[in-house]
Structure formats: C-alpha cells, structure tokens
Amino acid sequence: MRVTPIALVCVLAACTTADHAPADTVAAAIPDTAAAAASQFITAHGFGPLALGMTTADAGKVTNGALTVPSPSAPDQCEYAKWETAPNGVMVMFVGGVLKRVDVMQPGTPTVEGLEVGQTAARADSLYGAKATRQPHKYEAGEYLIVKPLAPQDSLQRLVVELTGGKVARFRIGLFPEVEWVEGCA
C-alpha cells in the first residue's frame, strides 16, 4: 500500500492536533460526576447550587433540569425531589414548592466543617458540641445534636445530627420547623 504525501500530512496533522489539545479542554469534555460530588459540601445555606428557601423552579434551573419536584397540590405539601445526579444518600425536601432541608443518609457528603455520616459522636461533639443542644432520639437509643443558628443572621437554620451507637447515623441541614421533623415528609 502506497501512502501519498497529502494523506501523510493529513494523518500527521490530525495526530498533532489531538496530541496537543489543552488538558483542561479534554478534561472539561469528560464529565467526572464522582469528582464533582466529592467537591460539594453541606453548608449552612444548602448544598452545591441548591440554597435553602429556593423554589422548585429555581432548583430545577441550577441543576440543569436534573432535579424535579411534583407541583404541590396544597400550600404545605411536603415532597422529596427526584434528583438523578445527587450523590448517594443525599435527599432534598421541598414544602409548598420551597427548599426546606437537605438530608444526608450515607458517607461521602460532608458538612463544610468536615462532619460525615459514619464518623464518631466525639467528632460531632468536637465540631459542634459547644453550639449544640441535645435531645433524646425518638426511635433509637441515641440522641439528636441540634446546632442553631448556624449563621447568626439566620435564626431559623439548623443542623440536626442523629447519633446512634456512638456514630453519626445521618444529618440534615434546613429551616425550622421542617429540619426538626423526625419522619421527614411522613
């Protein structure tokens, strides 16, 4: 098989262009959902692009349509969103079409201070104990560590950490009173 000079130039040009593409351009073209999820933390104001108090329409926009919530049939209807790209164990609650809380049920999504599901109760105490009140757990041998307010200007915000068996079983950030609802939307 004979290769013409024009064919050779075309092949070399294609290889050279691909070989010298900026690394950030190539990386940007490949979605890395694990890295994106790992870089997101639960904060006093929400999770990732989701902010407490935002509407379902705004939440859908900031997640590029990945998060959907049925339209409320009543002003106080409670619904957990369907969010296909959420990290495992992260659930988002809307009441009356407004984001009221974010629940974290599995390890992998920490608070900005570094608390994660599965860590010890001592770790939770070291991070929040001085700012928290304690209440007995409603259903298990354990307790709730309730941190309020997380931000001084936001007196309705709370972090509720559920401690059972000496470990962080789950936690949630949200607005009072919904953040303290033990059964979620039930």
Image (cartoon, rainbow, N blue to C red):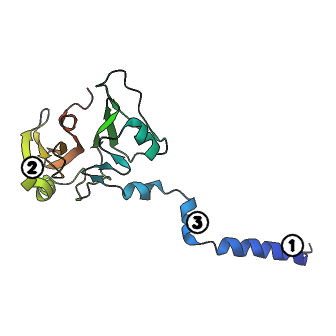
Label 2 and label 1: CA atoms lie apart by: 72 Å
Q: Which residue is mark 1?
A: 7
Quarter of the image where the C terminus is located: top left
Depth check, front residue: 126 or 63: 63
User: Disc 3 marks which amino acid?
Assistant: Val
Q: Write the residue at 59% across / 72% down.
A: 22
User: Disc 1 marks which amino acid?
Assistant: Ala
Q: Residue 47 placed where, x, y %?
A: 33, 49
Depth check, front residue: 167 or 13: 13
Secondary structure state at the residue bearing disc 1:
helix
Left or right relative to 129: residue 95: right
User: Disc 2 marks which amino acid?
Assistant: Ala
Label 3 and label 2: CA atoms lie apart by: 46 Å
Left or right relative to 99: residue 122: left
Q: Write the residue at 16% across / 54% down.
A: 120
Label 3 environment density (alpha carbons within 10 Å; few <14, some 14–19, many ≥20): few
Place residue 177 in its image quadrant.
top left
State which tag comes first along the sequence, 3 or 2: 3
Left or right relative to 39: residue 122: left
Q: Residue 2 placed where, x, y %?
A: 92, 74
Depth check, front residue: 113 or 99: 99
State which tag comes first along the sequence, 3 or 1: 1
Q: Which residue is mark 3?
A: 26
Place residue 105 in its image quadrant.
top left
Quarter of the image where the N terminus is located: bottom right
Q: Which residue is mark 2?
A: 132
Label 3 and label 1: CA atoms lie apart by: 26 Å
- Extreme residue toward the front, this view: 153
